[in-house]
Amino acid sequence: MNKAKRRTVIAGNWKMNKTPSETTALINEMKPLVKDADCDVLLCVPFVDIAAATKAAEGSNIKIGAENVHFKESGAYTGEVSANMLKECNVEYVVIGHSERRQYFGETDQTVNLRTLAALNGGLKAIVCVGETLEQRELGYTETLLKYQTKMALTNVTAEQLKNVIVAYEPVWAIGTGVTATAEQADEGNGFVRAAIAEVYGKDVAETVTVQYGGSMNAKNADELLSKVNVDGGLIGGASLKAEDFSIIVKAASK
Ligand code: PEP
């Protein structure tokens, strides 16, 4: 296992937080704090904040992502946004299949796959989220579920396209709850994701894919979580809304 083969990526997921003016202020506060990062730094923001975010981040090492993408290029899909729209707004990444989308907005493994393909075909990089509920963990289905979700999300994704995919292991019970997986649980979950990728694309390819952990990662626990061999970065919710906390996580990932 060689972690050096993979890019470490720290991505903020702002969820439904921050107006455009607040976006400008927060990114301006973050820029000097993360400028020396030795990892990729990325903020995934609400659609309406993208223009402010890309403008504020211009010339810095902060990349901008969106929080969802539709699987069609255009059409009668009220409220949705397509990959080419995001691309034209200078968006580089998009979060797909976040558990909040699965839980509250009817996202399924099939739609996660379609959105992933649309993002990749549209020239975006995809951060695909997978994760088990507490009930699934307690029933002993974590490995089965993570492998299934990973393979379903990546159906018809070519090995070449996989270079633009990050998978985020996010145990549902740890998201926004303040309950963090132990470093061992995070490492194990990420390992299951990598094993699923290896089963489809081979071990060598799987070794190159960035697998993040997400779920209440914060300034205090980031060091330990990121020290694990399978944890190639983090998808950060709450702590990405505070410049200093986010920068501490970025620094932990840069060691
Ligand atoms: C997330 O939004 O993906 C997330 C992990 O949230 P939090 O860090 O707040 O648990």
Image (cartoon, rainbow, N blue to C red):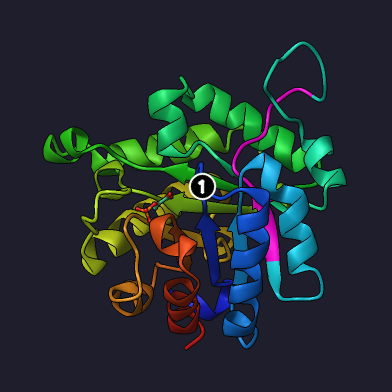
| Horizontal arrangement in the rendering, residue 48 relative to residue 207 (left or right) | right
Q: Is residue 210 above or below residue 145?
A: below
Q: Main secondary structure of the magenta part?
A: loop
Residue at horizontal 50 percent and vertical 45 percent from the top: 15
| Horizontal arrangement in the rendering, residue 178 relative to residue 92 (left or right) | left
Q: Is residue 70 magenta?
A: yes
SS at circle 1 = loop
Q: Is residue 24 magenta?
A: no
Q: Which span of residues is magenta-colored?
A: 63-72
Residue 74 appears anywhere in the view: yes
Along the viewing direction, whichever of 245 and 136 lies nearer the viewer: 245
**Which residue position holds label 1?**
17
Residue at horizontal 25 percent and vertical 68 percent from the top: 183
In which quarter of the view is residue 252 placed? bottom left
Along the viewing direction, whichever of 217 and 141 lies nearer the viewer: 217
Residue at horizontal 70 percent and vertical 64 percent from the top: 63
Residue extending furthest toward the right = 88
In which quarter of the view is residue 139 placed? top left
Q: Is residue 13 above or below residue 226?
A: above
Q: Residue 196 appears at what percent x and percent y?
A: 43, 47
Q: Residue 179 appears at what percent x and percent y?
A: 21, 55
Three-letter code, disc 1: Asn
Q: Residue 95 appears at what percent x and percent y?
A: 58, 45
* Quadrant of the drawing holding the N terminus: bottom left
Residue at horizontal 19 percent and vertical 39 percent from the top: 134
Residue 37 appears anywhere in the view: no
Along the viewing direction, whichever of 177 and 70 lies nearer the viewer: 177
Q: Residue 67 appears at what percent x and percent y?
A: 59, 42
| Horizontal arrangement in the rendering, residue 174 relative to residue 250 (left or right) | left
Q: Is residue 56 above or below residue 119?
A: below
Q: Residues within 10 Å of mark 1 (few under 14, many from 20)?
A: some
Along the viewing direction, whichever of 228 and 100 lies nearer the viewer: 100
